[in-house]
Amino acid sequence: MSDNRSKLPASELAESGRRVVFVRDLEIVVSVGVLEHEKRYEQRVLISVDLIVRDGYDGQSDRLEQVLDYGKLIDGIALLVQSGHFNLIETLAERVAAHCLGDARVENARVRVEKPDIMPSCRSVGVEVERRRS
């Protein structure tokens, strides 16, 4: 992500009982794009998320049930993005953000979707969205 961190200072996160859960560069092959060759062939995308989470974890229990399970988060994102064709990575990013906010513990989701193989003159192109629970 651009700054790889939550916009909240660490002290504010700690005092509020929130934490940041993140996934970096989840590589998935998906059907995305508006050009004919993009519709015919799947391509790699990289998905990164930063989630501000209020999970009630007490810092002592050491039990997975008390925190957001990033394994389940990754599986859910993969299932979502492989469910069909997306014309725009903007749509893909919005759906990933909505999926993340579907967990009541997630207050804020910042999602970045990158297409690393589409433009030979740069490392990647993409979009980043940030959504908050209303």
Image (cartoon, rainbow, N blue to C red):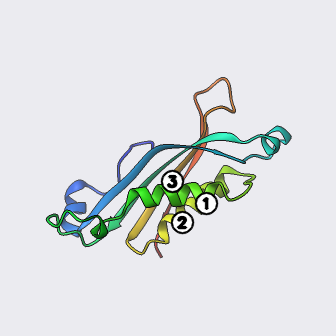
Mark closer to the observer (1, 2): 1
- Residue 101 vs residue 52: left or right? right
Q: Which residue is mark 2?
A: 99
| x, y percent for residue 20 | 33, 57
What secondary structure is found at the residue carrying circle 1?
Answer: helix
Measure the C-alpha gap from mark 1 to mark 2: 8 Å
Residue at 27%, 69% in the rendered image: 66
Dot 3: element? strand
Asked if marks 1 and 2 touch (Cβ < 8 Å), the reply is yes
What is the quadrant of residue 103 in the picture?
Answer: bottom left
- Residue 124 falls in image quadrant: top right
Which amino acid, by three-letter code, is at mark 2?
His
Crowding around mark 2 (Cα neighbors within 10 Å: few <14, some 14 to 19, many 20+) is some
Residue 12 seen in the figure: yes
Q: Is residue 49 above or below residue 105?
A: above
Residue 7 visible, this angle: no
* Residue at the limit of the structure toward the right, as seen here: 36
Q: Is residue 5 left or right of residue 33?
A: left
Residue 10 falls in which quadrant of the image?
bottom left
Tell me the kind of residue under disc 1: Leu
Q: Earlier in the sequence, mark 1 or mark 2?
A: 1
Q: Which residue is mark 3?
A: 111
Residue denoted by label 1: 80
Give the residue type that dot 3 points to.
Answer: Val
Q: Residue at x 72, y 57 (%)?
A: 84
Residue displayed at 42% across by 49% down:
23
Q: Secondary structure at mark 2?
A: helix
Tag in front: 2 or 3: 2
- At a point 61% along the width and 60% down the height, the residue shown is 80
How far apart are the two marked residues, 2 and 3, measured between alpha carbons?
11 Å
